[in-house]
Image (cartoon, grey):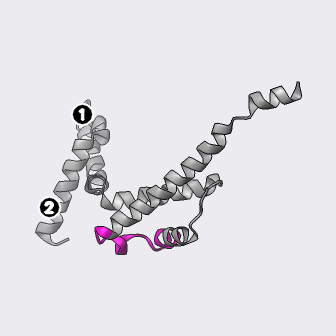
Amino acid sequence: MKGAQGNVFSNPLADNLEIDVGRLVRDALVESVRRVKRARQWHRVKPLTRAFAEAFLIMKLKTVKSLDLLKVIIKTIRELKELLSRELQLIKLGMEKAWQISLLASKWGHPRAREWRSDKGFLIYWGLTMRWLTKLFGG
């Protein structure tokens, strides 16, 4: 009986899934580093992120079993992809100004001004505007 219950609860696919996730994340990190270097943006990567990525790629692990390590790898991949994404850069740049504008409009009584803060187009618009103004006035 005990053996039958053990077979019910053991799942051989779970072990394979763990290996595949680790390999997928590692491959994604390798590809992200490659893309950042090809775009000649490696100098813009934070020093700690750069050091972690280089050390991890030197280690050449076959499997990643630690959940904490997976979280750090995913965070590193996200940071590298943000460097290459023009859209995310514009959203970050326009976020502060968009919040200021929506706060001002809501104080003036606009009923839907708070919704502007989550509008992607509004954030990108202000990001483009701020980038253009800094180029125009040399900020």
Q: Quadrant of residue 93?
A: bottom left
Residue 13, above or below 38: above
Residue type, label 1: Gly
Question: Around disc 1, counting alpha carbons within 10 Å, would you say few (fewer than 14), some (14 to 19), or many (20 or more)?
Answer: few
Residue 86 at x, y percent in the picture: 26, 56
Q: Mark number for residue 38?
A: none
- Nearest the eye: 4 or 101: 4
Part of the protein shown in magenta: 38-52
**Which label sits in the foreground, 1 or 2?**
2
Label 1 SS: loop
Residue ID for mark 2: 132
Residue 26 at x, y percent in the picture: 51, 58
Q: Residue at x 53, y 54 (%)?
A: 23
Is residue 27 rendered to the left or right of residue 92? Answer: right
- Nearest the eye: 7 or 114: 7
Residue 69 at x, y percent in the picture: 60, 58
Q: Residue at x 82, y 27 (%)?
A: 5
